């Protein structure tokens, strides 16, 4: 009989980043735990769950929370009462704290459920140092929090064909148009910066420019993006999407996981930071210069940074490979700890 593992995660099937996190976490769990059956629950379970769902979860051997940005105001507050009724071991796996530019901080009652969850867990890991600082600053023992990175880094790739794949220079773009309320206030500057950067690569290198779709709502804003011969990459299979990223020379992204997948694929990336997590991903991988502040767009920083990173792309590829291996060692150690819980080693 297969061992049943409960996984509580963000249930957004439209957002490629959320899907990639779930897929990667499941791939990793299956590789390390063997013949398991994963029973999925939406993150809203932690906010309000009925007795039937609680019973179903407690029939599993382990509850894995995450990965992904589950410490987000839209998912709050978690219910201490629901968490108390989880009777199986809890593992928090590579999760993150989300706060967009201009968004409010979490309220004390929202933090309470998060902290209770982590204090109940057998193992706790987060995807970046800022998420650890958030938890430790609100009552979780810092020594108990492992910073292991984002599971989506290790999503498998699947080779595929895509348009103009043999172009000499290939540049990927991505925007966040999937719910960030601040986009409208900065839309003109963001689009002009992207257009200027794309034009530079087309004129200097004859580059093929790709748009890397991470959410269906981005199709609305793509129509406003004046980039010649733009090719949209939109694979339902995220393993193919990531493979395409591995074939590009540079990716400029806003959605966090356009950059997480780029890093995992070994492709230099620049992260346009609309959220604290974007800046902290750049710090986590060891290259803070790969994050561009929104306020710096009007100064032409995006084009300047893109030109520099492209020129030094071999350096970044080599360093990404090294850093990815170090992050893998952290994941591997954490997965071994999960295995000990499951099999009482």
Image (cartoon, rainbow, N blue to C red):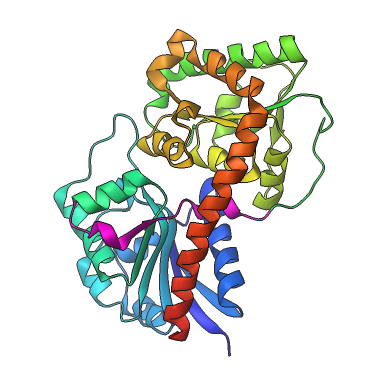
Up/down of 224 relative to 141, above or below: above
| The C terminus - image quarter | bottom left
Q: Can the viewer see residue 238?
A: yes
Q: Residue at x 42, y 85 (%)?
A: 59
For the view shown, which residue lies furthest in the bottom direction? 1
| The N terminus - image quarter | bottom right
Left or right, 277 with respect to 249, comes to left
Foreground pick, 226 / 286: 286
Find residue 285 and report its horizontal and vertical position in percent: 48, 41
Residue 154 falls within the magenta-colored stretch: yes
Q: Residue at x 39, y 47 (%)?
A: 128
- State which quadrant residue 209 falls in: top right
Foreground pick, 332 / 206: 332
Up/down of 234 relative to 194, above or below: below
What span is colored magenta in the figure? 138-156
Foreground pick, 109 / 220: 109
Find residue 82 and report its horizontal and vertical position in percent: 26, 71
């Amino acid at each position: 009989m297969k061992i049943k593992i409960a996984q509580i995660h963000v249930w957004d099937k439209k957002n490629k980043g959320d899907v990639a996190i779930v897929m990667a976490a499941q791939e990793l769990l299956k590789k390390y735990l063997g013949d398991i059956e994963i029973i999925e629950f939406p993150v809203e379970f932690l906010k309000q769950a009925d007795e039937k769902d609680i019973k179903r979860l407690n029939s599993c051997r382990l509850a894995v929370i995450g990965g992904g940005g589950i410490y987000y105001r839209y998912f709050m507050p978690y219910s201490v009462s629901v968490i108390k009724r989880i009777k199986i071991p809890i593992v928090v796996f590579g999760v993150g704290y989300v706060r967009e530019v201009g968004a409010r901080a979490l309220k004390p009652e929202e933090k309470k459920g998060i902290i209770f969850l982590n204090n109940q867990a057998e193992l706790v890991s987060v995807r970046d140092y800022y998420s650890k600082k958030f938890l430790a600053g609100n009552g979780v023992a810092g020594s108990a929090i492992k910073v292991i990175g984002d599971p989506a880094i290790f999503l498998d790739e699947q080779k595929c064909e895509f348009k103009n794949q043999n172009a000499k220079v290939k540049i990927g773009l991505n925007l966040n148009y999937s719910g960030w309320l601040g986009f409208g206030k900065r839309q003109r500057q963001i689009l002009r910066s992207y257009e200027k950067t794309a034009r530079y690569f087309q004129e200097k290198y004859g580059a093929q420019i790709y748009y890397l779709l991470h959410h269906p709502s981005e199709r609305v804003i793509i129509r406003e993006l004046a980039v010649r011969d733009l090719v949209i990459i939109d694979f339902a299979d995220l393993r193919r999407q990531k493979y395409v990223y591995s074939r590009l020379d540079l990716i400029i992204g806003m959605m966090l996981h356009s950059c997480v997948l780029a890093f995992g694929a070994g492709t230099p990336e620049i992260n346009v930071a609309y959220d604290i997590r974007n800046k902290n991903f750049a710090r986590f991988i060891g290259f803070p210069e790969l994050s561009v502040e929104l306020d710096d767009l009007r100064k032409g920083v995006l084009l300047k940074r893109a030109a520099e990173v492209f020129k030094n792309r071999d350096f970044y590829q080599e360093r990404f490979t090294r850093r990815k291996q170090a992050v893998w060692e952290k994941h591997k150690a954490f997965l071994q700890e999960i295995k000990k819980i499951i099999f009482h080693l």
